[in-house]
Image (cartoon, grey):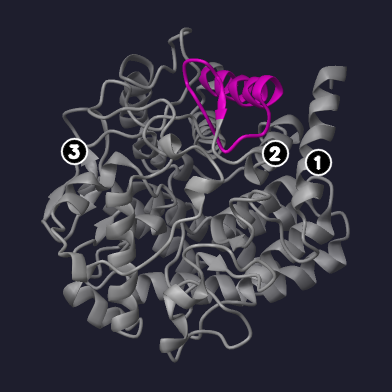
Amino acid sequence: MRRRERALLEQAKLVLDFNWTGGYTKPGPRLYPHQWSWDSALISIGYSHYDQDRAESELLHLFDAQWRNGLLPQIVFNPSFGDYFPGPGFWHAQESPDAPRNHRTSGVVQPPVHATAVRLVYERARDRGRAREFLERAYPHLVFWHDYLHRERDPRDEGLAYIRHPWESGMDNSPLWDAILQRLHLREDEIPSYRRVDVHTVSEQDRPTSAAYDRFAYLVRLFATHGYDEAAIREECPFLVQDVLFNSLLCRAEADLAELAPEIGEDPAPHRERARRTARAIDEKLWDEEHGTYLDYDLAAGRPIHVYCASNFLPLFAGVPDEERARRMVDFLEHGGFGLSDRRMRPVPSYDVHGFGFSPTRYWRGPVWINIDWFLLRGLERYGYREHSARLSTTIRELCERSGFYEYFDPFTGQGHGSVLFSWSAALLVDVLLAAADEAPSPRQP
């Protein structure tokens, strides 16, 4: 490793040290003081290279807040940080008999990347005895989590889980959700009272609009009104989406569970079957033949969502498409609005630069996100597109080195936006710098 890379690696570790609370790592020092679900999973991947204890603690702290029905919450609240919206008093998660009593949490989920993280933490651990103990503790939580998604979020038994709030996608402000949110014509009395704090921490121009937040808040109140009963929510919720990113990560997570199960004497077959089933469903229902990528599906409207985002390409990470479909996806990444072969921008913008409402700086409406680039570079590696994956690896290094460890970045200028000292940007840079290209291989087609 060159001197510059060693220095960058140490800077990334310092960011993680700064955000470490003793039990979990804050995503960002001011804007995100609590524990976020998929943030912690991605952060643990960085720790897995050099701090086994933190990597394990990060995930176990999250699992300790799992609901009795298997739901793994988006946020685990830290009572030391009260000035945050939406806080536990807004969620009313305790209205559910399934909510944990030892933690205050939100009532939604985030993408299921946790089994993938557990596998990397387990396989990279130096203390093998402690790693086995960790896996024995983590495995039942992962099975319980996946069971919840297949049981409660796939009522038609299609092999695809739905999300019921933009926050569950992890891509809160994506153009993917515009048409659904625009269908919600809310009266003033239907909008819960709330006070945002995000716009006092980072630029208001980078954040979701107030109209979007009104609808986010409306959905939260809907869930609380129904006591977080999934069947009742499903009947009334206007936002039910089979999301490409969410299901791709679920597919990969089931395949990773299949690899982990024999390590502790469990049967891998059910996980392999679920992975194959979800892969088939993604391939058959979500593939867009016209453009050569995958599309989210709006269950409430009964139609695909024709919006093109970087997350549409995440089936590559899960090994879903065959070689021909993968080739078409790479062609779209190269010659569409994602700049994989365009030296004038830093790939990959989170939304097609030719799309309506593209913004290089507004939250999930165009900026480059390190986690999306990380998923894509691993997917491109999987299919043998080494030159493209190398470009994304270089992009991740250069963005962090030149601009700092920001939450997201302008694809044209490289300038950082959102939260500074952002933990998953630091953690995934650690992985890019230290992971061998062939580490933790898994079969391409589940």
Distance from disc 1 to disc 2, alpha carbons, whole Å, reads 7 Å
Does the magenta portion include 397?
A: yes
The numbered mark, 3 or 2, whose residue comes first in the sequence reads: 3
Of residues 79 and 188, the one nearer the viewer is 188
Disc nearer the start of the sequence (3/1): 1
Q: Which amino acid, mark 1?
A: Lys
Residue depicted at 49% across the width and 84% down the height: 99
Secondary structure type for disc 1: helix
The answer to whether one can see residue 266 in this image is: no
Quadrant hosting residue 134: bottom right
Which mark, by number, is residue 82?
A: none
Q: Is residue 344 above or below residue 107?
A: above
Q: Nearer the viewer, mark 3 or mark 2?
A: 2
SS under mark 3: loop
Percent position of residue 145, x then y? 49, 72
Residue 123 lies left or right of residue 117; in this view the side is right
Neighbour class for label 3 at 10 Å: few (<14), some, many (≥20)?
few
With respect to residue 443, does 241 lie above or below? below
The mark closer to the camera, 3 or 1, is: 1
Which label sits on residue 13? 1
Pick the front one: 141 or 101: 101
Residue sitting at 62 percent across and 62 percent down? 35
Q: Provide the residue span drawn in magenta.
A: 388-416
Q: Secondary structure at mark 2?
A: helix
Question: Crowdedness of circle 2 by 10 Å Cα count: few (<14), some, many (20+)?
Answer: many
Disc 3 to disc 1, how far (Cα)? 40 Å
Residue 6: which quarter of the image? top right
Is 117 on the left or on the right of 215, as rendered? right
**Residue under circle 3?**
306
